[in-house]
C-alpha cells in the first residue's frame, strides 16, 4: 500500500514538474494604429477573431508604450525584442543619418536590392542593433525554427521577424506584387512568385466598401488598396500561403509567423478614430483575424499555437472633430517651428542654413556650420530650444544635452522621450505639442507620448495561457520576455520588460 502511494505521489510530482509541451507555432500579430478603446467601443460588433481573443485570451486593459515618438517602426521593433528605441537604435520611421549625410528609413539598406517588384534599393533589419524572439529561437536550435514576417509595410514585416528570419514580405504599390530583399535570399521563394502570379491586388479592381470604391486601373488601384479593408485581406491571404508553403508549425522546433495589418493605419490617418470607416475597419479586422485563426487551426490546431496581438501605436482625434465637441487640440504648421528656430539661430550666430533636417518631432542642426563658427553645440541647441518653446502650444522642448545628461523635468513624459533617444542617431532638438495638437495639415496622426497614442491592446491566447482580464499596468515591452519564458529561450538582448507570469498556466 505504502509503495503504491509513493509511486502515485512520484507520478503526481513528475506530472506537475513536467512543463507543458511548447507551442508548435507562435503567431505574432500587430494591428497598425489600433487604440485599446477600439476593443471596447466596438465590442458588441465583434463576433469572430476579436471575440475569440477577448473571451479565450489573457487581455491586458492597461498596456502603454513607454517611448516617444509612438510610430510604426518603433512599435514593431519593440514588439518581439522587448527593447526601447534608446537600446534598439530604431528611433523613428526615418531619421537623418549623420554618417550617410541623408535621411534614412528604419530598414533602408543600400547593400541590398528589392526582389520581385520594380527594381529599387532593398531593406533589411541591419539598423536594429538588438534581436527578436525569432532570433533567440534560431540561435537556440541552430536555425531549426522557421521565422517569417508579412505585412503591407517593409518595416512592419522586417523588424518583428528579426535578423535571422527566413524571409520578410511586404507590398510594393509600384508593381502590385509582394516583394522582399536580397538580404534574405537571391530569389523570391517559389510560393511568393506564385502568389504574385495570381495578381493578388487585381481581384479588388473597383471593389466597394461603405460609400467608397477602389480604382479600376492597376497602378491607381495598387496605391489606393492600402487604405482599404482589402489591404488586410491580401496580407492575411499571404500569411496563409506562408504557413502552408513553409510548413510552419510542422517542424521539430517552434516556428514564428509575424503578421502586421497596415490598412487600419492608412484609413485612420485619412479619416481619424471617430470616422465610420475606422469603425468598419475594426469590424472587418475581426473577420480577417478569424480567417487567420481558422488557417492556424487547420495547420497545427489552435491548441498547439500561441497567439499574441498588440498594436504599434494609437492615434489622435482629428483636431476639427475635437473642436466641435469643445475638446482641446489643433494643427501646428511644422514650417512655423523650423522657421522660428532658423531665425533665432541666424539672428544670434549669423546667416547660414542652420537646420539640416527636420521631422515632425525633431530637428537636426548644422554641426559643420557650428564647427566652422567655433560655437558650443550645447549653447546653439539651447538657443533653438528657447525660441521654439516661446511658440504657442509647444508642450516640451528637449535638447540633446537635456536627454543625454538627464537634465529635464523627471516625469513620465520625459522618461518616454529619454527612452526614445539613441545618442548616436538622435536629433539635437526634440519637440512635443500640447495634448491633441498635431503637426499634420490634414487628417490626423500619432507619435505623442500621450495616452491616445500609447495605450494599445496586448492579448495572449493559446497553449499555456490563463484566460481573463488583467488590470495591472504593463507595457508591450513585456511581450518578448514573456514569450522567451514560455518558449524556454534566452530573452532578447535589449529587452527591458518583465515576464507576465500571471497569465502563464
Ligand atoms: Zn503604425
Image (spheres, helix red, strand yellow):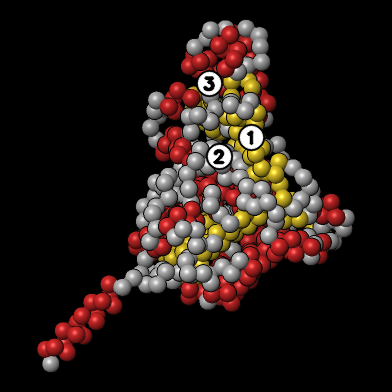
Which is nearer the N-term, disc 1 or disc 2? 1
Q: Residue at x 47, y 66 (%)?
A: 253
Q: Earlier in the sequence, mark 1 or mark 3?
A: 1
In the image, 366 versus 177, the foreground residue is 177
**Residue 387 appears in view:** no
Please indicate whether residue 480 sits to the left or right of residue 27 in the image.
left
Left or right: 179, with 164 as reference point:
right
The CA distance from mark 2 to mark 3 is 28 Å
Q: Position of residue 74 (x, y in %)?
A: 54, 44
* Element type at mark 2: loop
Q: Quick one: 464 or 159, which is closer to the camera?
A: 159
Residue at horizontal 13 percent and vertical 88 percent from the top: 3
Is disc 1 in contact with disc 2, using a CB cutoff of under 8 Å?
yes
Residue 362, which numbered label? none
Q: Earlier in the sequence, mark 2 or mark 3?
A: 2
Q: From the top left corner, tell me how far across and down residue 32 is, in percent.
A: 60, 53
Residue ID for mark 1: 104
Q: Where 309 falls versus 379 (above or below)? A: below
Residue for badge 2: 127
Disc 3 secondary structure class = helix
- Say if residue 415 shows up in the picture: yes
State whether residue 108 is above or below residue 154. Answer: above
Label 1: how many residues lie within 10 Å, few (<14), some (14-19) or many (20+)? Answer: some
In space, the residues marked 1 and 2 are separated at their CA atoms by 10 Å
Residue at the left extreme of this rendering: 2
Q: Which residue is mark 3?
A: 385
In the rendered image, the residue lying farthest to the right is 217
Circle 2 packing at 10 Å, graded few (<14), some (14-19), many (20+), is some
Amino acid at each position: 500500500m505504502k509503495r503504491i502511494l509513493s509511486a502515485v505521489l512520484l507520478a503526481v510530482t513528475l506530472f506537475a514538474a513536467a512543463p507543458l509541451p511548447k507551442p508548435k507555432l507562435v503567431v505574432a500579430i500587430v494591428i497598425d494604429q489600433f487604440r485599446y478603446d477600439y476593443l471596447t467601443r466596438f465590442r458588441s460588433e465583434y463576433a469572430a477573431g476579436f471575440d475569440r481573443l477577448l473571451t479565450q485570451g489573457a487581455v491586458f486593459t492597461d498596456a502603454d508604450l513607454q517611448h516617444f515618438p509612438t510610430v510604426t517602426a518603433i512599435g514593431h521593433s519593440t514588439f518581439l525584442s522587448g527593447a526601447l528605441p534608446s537600446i534598439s537604435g530604431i528611433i523613428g520611421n526615418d531619421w537623418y543619418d549623420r554618417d550617410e549625410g541623408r535621411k534614412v528609413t528604419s530598414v533602408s539598406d543600400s547593400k541590398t536590392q528589392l526582389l520581385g517588384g520594380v527594381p529599387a534599393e532593398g531593406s533589411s533589419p541591419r539598423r536594429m542593433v538588438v534581436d527578436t524572439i525569432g532570433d533567440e529561437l534560431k540561435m537556440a536550435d541552430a536555425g531549426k525554427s522557421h521565422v517569417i514576417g508579412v505585412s503591407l509595410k517593409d518595416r512592419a514585416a522586417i523588424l518583428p521577424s528579426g535578423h535571422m528570419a527566413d524571409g520578410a514580405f511586404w507590398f510594393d504599390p509600384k508593381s502590385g506584387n509582394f516583394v522582399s530583399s536580397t538580404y534574405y535570399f537571391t530569389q523570391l521563394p517559389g510560393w511568393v512568385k506564385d502568389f504574385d502570379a495570381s495578381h493578388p491586388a487585381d481581384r479588388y479592381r473597383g471593389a466597394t466598401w461603405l460609400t467608397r470604391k477602389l480604382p479600376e486601373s492597376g497602378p491607381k488601384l495598387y496605391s489606393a488598396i492600402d487604405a482599404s479593408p482589402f489591404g488586410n485581406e491580401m496580407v492575411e491571404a499571404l500569411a496563409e500561403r506562408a504557413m502552408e508553403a513553409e510548413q510552419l508549425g510542422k517542424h521539430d522546433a517552434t516556428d514564428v509567423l509575424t503578421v502586421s495589418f497596415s490598412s487600419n493605419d492608412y484609413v485612420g490617418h485619412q479619416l481619424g478614430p471617430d470616422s465610420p470607416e475606422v469603425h468598419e475597419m475594426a469590424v472587418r479586422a475581426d473577420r480577417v483575424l478569424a480567417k487567420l485563426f481558422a488557417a492556424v487551426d487547420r495547420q497545427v490546431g489552435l491548441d498547439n499555437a500561441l497567439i499574441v496581438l498588440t498594436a504599434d501605436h494609437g492615434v489622435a482625434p482629428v483636431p476639427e472633430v475635437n473642436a466641435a465637441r469643445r475638446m482641446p487640440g489643433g494643427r501646428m504648421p511644422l514650417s512655423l517651428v523650423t522657421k522660428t528656430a532658423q531665425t533665432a539661430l541666424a539672428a544670434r550666430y549669423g546667416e547660414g542654413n542652420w537646420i539640416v533636417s527636420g521631422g515632425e518631432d525633431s530637428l537636426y542642426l548644422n554641426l559643420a556650420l557650428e564647427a566652422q563658427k567655433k560655437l558650443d553645440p550645447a549653447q546653439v541647441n539651447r538657443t533653438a530650444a528657447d525660441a521654439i518653446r516661446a511658440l504657442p502650444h509647444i508642450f516640451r522642448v528637449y535638447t540633446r544635452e537635456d536627454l543625454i545628461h538627464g537634465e529635464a523635468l523627471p516625469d513620465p513624459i520625459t522618461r518616454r522621450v529619454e527612452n526614445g533617444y539613441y545618442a548616436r542617431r538622435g536629433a539635437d532638438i526634440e519637440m512635443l505639442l500640447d495634448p491633441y495638437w498635431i503637426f499634420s495639415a490634414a487628417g490626423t496622426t500619432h507619435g505623442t507620448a500621450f495616452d491616445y497614442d500609447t495605450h494599445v491592446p496586448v492579448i495572449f491566447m493559446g497553449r499555456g495561457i490563463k484566460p481573463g482580464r488583467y488590470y495591472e499596468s504593463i507595457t508591450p515591452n513585456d511581450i518578448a520576455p514573456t514569450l522567451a519564458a514560455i518558449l524556454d529561450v534566452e530573452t532578447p538582448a535589449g529587452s527591458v520588460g518583465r515576464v507576465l507570469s500571471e497569465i502563464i498556466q
